[in-house]
Amino acid sequence: MQFFVDTADTNDIRELESMGILDGVTTNPSLIMKSGRDFKEVIKEICGITKGPVSAEVTAIEADAMIAEGKNLATLAENVVVKLPLTWDGLRACRALTDAGIRTNVTLCFSATQALLAAKAGATYVSPFVGRLDDIGQDGMQLIADIITIYENYPSLTTQVLVASIRNPVHVLDAARMGADVATVPPSILKQLVKHPLTDKGLAAFLDDWKKTGQKIL
Ligand code: G3P
């Protein structure tokens, strides 16, 4: 499973990239707002940090305007992936941009039939939002399982399943168990994945015993 980071914070992206655990980046208008930075400037900077796909979202709601925005965003760097909302116009824009050779990420997906349409429209990625479904009492990870089954039923559908709106390490674990192509994870959740109380306890005991030996490595 590929790890994308869901942020526009370039310090976090730089650190993860330097550790070699980053496969790509996703952003959305809310994350751009949180960064307090100019949209195009921050996307260009992110694309300079990582060679992986970087999702940049259109803000138009009508297909022709989305296509124009998408084409413009795609000129920022060759690893830009144009993010489009899962609306009728978004699907029309997806087909046009895909046919123009531009990679797309169809976002705000909340049903398997929406994901089927995104694949038919040629999306490179579809982003089902698991956390937001859990928030309203639905099973976000069941949606991922359904989409994976449907895509596997029809091998001509090549859209990758990008699990989004991840809120906890269990979402990441379940996504990997199900064989999702990508999980886009906020930096705070990525850092939680390393945590285990037995690791901390074991390390403390090792360091304690090492101290008793009176030795030094350097
Ligand atoms: O980038 C889209 C998605 O990951 C949003 O997550 O936590 O705002 O539902 P969240």
Image: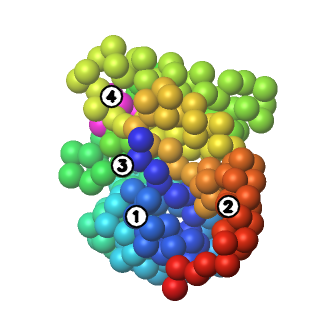
Q: Is residue 25 left or right of residue 96?
A: right
Task: Tell which circle, 2 or 4, labels the residue nearer the N-terminal end.
Answer: 4
Q: Main secondary structure of the magenta part?
A: helix
Pick the residue in front: 56 or 216.
216
Q: Measured from the top left, where is residue 12 in percent x and y?
A: 57, 71
218 or 78: nearer the viewer: 218
Residue mark closest to the camera, 4 vs 1:
1
Mark 4 crowd level (few <14, some 14–19, many ≥20, 10 Å Cα):
some
Sequence-wise, the earlier of marks 1 and 2 is 1
Q: Which sits in the foreground, 18 or 199? A: 199
Q: Which residue is mark 4?
A: 120
Q: Residue at x 65, y 37 (%)?
A: 170
* Magenta stretch in the rendered image: 118-122
Q: Quadrant of the N terminus?
A: top left
What is the spatial separation of the Cα atoms under label 2 and label 3, in whole angstroms?
49 Å
x 39%, y 75%: residue: 49
Name the amino acid type tagged 1: Gly
Give the percent coordinates (x, y) of residue 118: 40, 33
Q: Name the amino acid, label 4.
A: Lys
- Specify few, some or many for label 2: CA neighbours under 10 Å numbering under 14, 14-19, or 20 or more: few
Please state the horizontal and vertical placement of residue 217, each as a whole percent of the image: 53, 79
Residue at position x 43%, y 60% from top?
A: 22
Amino acid residing under circle 2: Phe
Mark in front: 1 vs 2: 2
Q: Secondary structure at mark 4?
A: helix
Q: Which residue is mark 2?
A: 206
Q: Secondary structure at mark 1?
A: loop
List the residue tagged with mark 1.
20
User: Looking at the image, is mark 1 or mark 3 earlier in the sequence?
Assistant: 1
Q: Nearer the viewer, mark 1 or mark 3?
A: 1
Which badge, 2 or 3, is on the more N-terminal residue?
3
Q: Residue furthest front?
A: 213
